[in-house]
Image (tube, grey):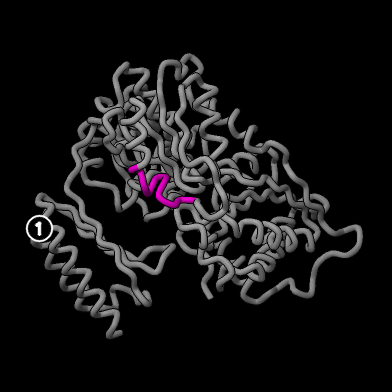
């Protein structure tokens, strides 16, 4: 069974493959993998989680597996995904594990793994762990007596992370006079995010900051910015910030309630860095899903856009390979490698606010840096995922639509890496026309999958 997808392991909690038994086996495999080469053979592994109910189950199962192999565990409790990466590197731990299903509903959960450098594991390492779990390679192994590992709890891990986050705002700036709505989706940033903006001087209107284990992402956060927008209007805020359940992505709205998505945030921050001479190699990394308008806006200012596969880990890989320092996804995963090793919603928000403060203009004006090309995305459930190139009729209709769009549009069809879904994305001059094309392609895919 394949465990790792685009962003770690993910599925419904207590349903294969996302079971305590799998987590126990994975804990053993992690300890074995990261103890290799460690002096004394005693690895240290950090574990953090978001606020969903099943986090307790997987936290304990992973810890048990790790300790049984003679490695030590350091428990952070609820902490954003980028916060776990930070704690891992600041403690010089050998690995970090995040228990989270990101933006998914509470009944799902997942596991993401960072190396000691704070970056997500490459595919080859995930494949090795997957092999060990499938074969239960260490079922008969483990340590005995005094060689068993220990579990420790890191007190106030979230407060350490707050101190780190505040460094993303230049030292000569503060947020005095700004009123900011902060929507934490009842997720991992429920304490962290409000504290960061308050301590930097803003008046904060916090919403969705009372997690109960089952309300994470429920009607709030990056996937549901409506509540944030409503609060901006009610309180007359200068902007709103909506994070997802593990706070590695952000959607921002300006003082008028207009959403500023990941593409626009990339454009405004990257172009500001271009002007200040801090954008490395005048290049930004985005994904194949990013709007054509982003590419055109950057090109007009002499900035090149490099596209990577969907998933912030692939964006980061392209950034590291090319020596670039800014990248991200339309969905709100933004990575600033000068500060973080993975997507961080709070850092991204602080970067956008920095541009506002430097220019002395409201976000609604600062965000006018790109003109979006009409884009349509059709998502639909699929019972299986046969290779799209094995479905000739699908290839024919895609080729036909691409001919009709010419140079003024794009077609992208892909399976989700985290859900049993297919995504059909089209860009073009006329929104109504491309929506018709998208639905026609989706219908052919559904038909051909049913026949396969």
Q: Residue furthest top?
A: 172
253 up-or-down from 315: above or below: above
301 up-or-down from 421: above or below: above
Tell me what residue is drawn at x 40 percent, y 35 percent. Answer: 241
Indicate the position of residue 415 as horizontal and vertical percent values: 35, 66
Number of marks in the rendered image: 1
Indicate the position of residue 201 as horizontal and vertical percent values: 49, 19
- The secondary structure making up most of the magenta span is loop
Query: Is 416 placed left or right of 18 in the picture?
Result: left
Residue 76 visible? The answer is yes
Q: Secondary structure at mark 1?
A: helix
**In-front residue for pair 411/366:** 366
- Does the segment drawn in magenta span residue 219? yes
- Does the segment drawn in magenta span residue 440? no
Which range of residues does the magenta coloring cover? 216-226
Query: Is 136 placed left or right of 423 in the picture?
Result: right
Q: Residue furthest right?
A: 145
Indicate the position of residue 52 as horizontal and vertical percent values: 56, 54
Tell me what residue is drawn at x 37 percent, y 55 percent. Answer: 309
């Amino acid at each position: 069974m394949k465990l790792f997808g685009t962003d770690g392991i993910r599925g419904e909690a207590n349903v294969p493959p996302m079971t305590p038994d799998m987590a126990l086996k994975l804990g053993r495999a992690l300890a074995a993998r990261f103890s290799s080469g460690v002096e004394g053979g005693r690895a240290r592994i950090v574990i953090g989680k978001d606020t969903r109910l099943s986090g307790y189950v997987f936290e304990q199962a992973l810890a048990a597996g790790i300790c049984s192999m003679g490695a030590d565990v350091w428990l952070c409790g609820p902490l954003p995904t980028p916060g776990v990466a930070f704690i891992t590197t600041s403690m010089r731990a050998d690995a970090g594990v995040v228990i989270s299903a990101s933006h998914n509903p509470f009944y799902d959960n997942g596991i993401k793994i960072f190396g000691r450098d704070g970056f997500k594991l490459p595919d080859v390492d995930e494949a090795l762990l997957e092999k060990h779990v499938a074969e239960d390679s260490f079922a008969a192994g483990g340590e005995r007596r005094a060689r068993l590992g220990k579990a420790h709890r890191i007190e106030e891990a979230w407060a350490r992370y707050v101190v780190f986050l505040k460094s993303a705002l230049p030292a000569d700036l503060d947020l005095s006079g700004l009123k900011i709505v902060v929507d934490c989706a009842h997720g991992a940033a429920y304490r962290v995010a409000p504290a960061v903006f308050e301590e930097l001087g803003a008046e904060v209107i916090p919403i969705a900051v009372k997690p109960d284990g089952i309300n994470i992402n429920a009607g709030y956060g990056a996937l549901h910015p409506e509540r944030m927008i409503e609060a901006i209007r009610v309180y007359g805020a200068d902007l709103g910030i909506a994070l997802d359940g593990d706070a590695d992505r952000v959607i921002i709205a300006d003082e008028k309630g207009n959403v500023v998505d990941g593409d626009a945030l990339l454009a405004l921050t990257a172009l500001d860095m271009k002007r200040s001479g801090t954008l490395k190699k005048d290049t930004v990394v985005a994904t194949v899903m990013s709007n054509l308008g982003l590419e055109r806006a950057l090109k007009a200012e002499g900035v090149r856009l490099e596209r990577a596969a969907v998933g912030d880990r692939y964006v980061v890989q392209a950034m590291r390979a090319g020596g670039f320092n800014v990248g991200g996804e339309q969905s709100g995963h933004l990575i600033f490698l000068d500060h973080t090793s993975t997507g961080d919603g709070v850092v991204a928000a602080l970067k956008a606010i920095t541009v506002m403060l430097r220019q002395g203009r409201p976000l609604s004006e600062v965000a006018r840096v790109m003109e979006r090309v009409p884009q349509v995305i059709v998502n639909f459930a699929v019972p299986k995922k046969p290779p799209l190139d094995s479905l000739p009729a699908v290839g024919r209709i895609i080729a036909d639509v691409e001919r009709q769009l010419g140079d003024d549009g794009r077609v992208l069809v892909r399976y989700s890496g985290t859900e049993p879904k297919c995504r059909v994305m089209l860009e073009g001059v006329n929104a109504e026309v491309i929506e018709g094309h998208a639905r026609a392609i989706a219908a052919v895919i559904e038909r051909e999958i049913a026949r396969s």
